[in-house]
Amino acid sequence: MRRTLIVGNWKMNGDRAALAELGGIATAAAACPAIDVAICPPATLIAAATGSGIAIGGQDCHAAARGAHTGCLSAGMLVEAGAALCIVGHSERRCDQHETDADVRAKAIAAMAAGMIAIVCVGETEAERDAGDAVAVVAAQIDGSVPDDATPDALVVAYEPVWAIGTGRVPSIADVAEMHGAIRTRLSAKLGAAAAGGVRILYGGSMNGANAAALLAVADVDGGLVGGASLTAAAFVPIIEAAQAVG
Ligand code: PEP
């Protein structure tokens, strides 16, 4: 009932030549019909990436529909360019752009209102985990960042421990299981058990072709949000194939 979703986040990487990678990714995705695959390239490449055969998403959107916000893009603009999904609240934006839970929630509402799936990112820092606060921190992010009336067709949550992003480090399988279970429980309290049961919860943070199968086999892990290993078909396709094999 929850289709596995594998999303690539290219961050501020990639140019038009990099779009050639989408061919191999789309071929693999077509051969793995049990799972959904999407790529979130830089916004400048969204329009050119549509038609690749896989879903295309944005990496951020503004909460407002229009206005005096130089350099920003509205959710409607992303949709017009061809985006079907939008990442909001990535830890790099929470850190670099000082985005709060309230900001992330407003962006998620805007993305959903424009017809996109909002991928709401949450995750603790290493200091928070070391202090034993990881579950409490993420629960508070869920409370503050997820819109109250979010529905499973429009909401995806991505658990991304900040210390695992781009570092080659991943949490233990037990810690991933604990956190994803806790997120599901928190979503149930917020959205109701029926809705929460349909929300896909992705794991993100140094996922690659070697560790994907083990991570994706964890209960309540419904897919992956992948950064570095999504930049080439050679690195991303094994993750897609692992997801298909896990089912
Ligand atoms: C990310 O930034 O969303 C991410 C998961 O990055 P990486 O896979 O490179 O750790």
Image (cartoon, helix red, strand yellow):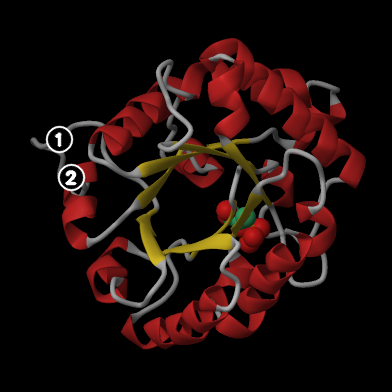
Instruction: Write down the quadrant of residue 6 in the picture.
Output: bottom right
Residue on which the image places disc 1: 65
Q: Indicate the amino acid at tag 2.
A: Gly
Residue on which the image places disc 2: 76
Residue 18, how many percent across, how many down?
42, 83
Front position in the image: 205 or 167: 205
Q: Residue at x 67, y 53 (%)?
A: 165
Front position in the image: 61 or 83: 83
State whether residue 144 is above or below residue 82: above
SS assignment at label 2 = helix
- The answer to the question of whether label 2 and label 1 lie on touching residues, with beta carbons closer than 8 A, is yes
Residue 170, how many percent across, how many down?
81, 52
> Which of the image's four quarters has the N terminus?
top right
Q: Residue at x 47, y 84 (%)?
A: 21
State whether residue 141 is above or below residue 22: above
- Can you tell me whether the CB of the residue at mark 2 lies under 8 Å from the nearest atom of ligand 1? no
Examine the rendering and report whether any part of residue 59 can be seen.
Answer: yes
Local packing at callout 1 (Cα closer than 10 Å; few below 14, some 14-19, many 20+) is: some
Comes first in the chain, label 2 or label 1 = 1
Residue 200, how many percent across, how many down?
59, 40
SS assignment at label 1 = loop
Examine the rendering and report whether any part of residue 8 can be seen.
Answer: no
Q: Is residue 136 left or right of residue 156?
A: right
Q: Quadrant of ligand 1?
A: bottom right
Front position in the image: 9 or 192: 192
Instruction: Write down the quadrant of residue 140 in the picture.
Output: top right
Q: Indicate the amino acid at tag 1.
A: Ala
State whether residue 34 is above or below residue 179: below
Residue 132, how many percent across, how many down?
85, 22
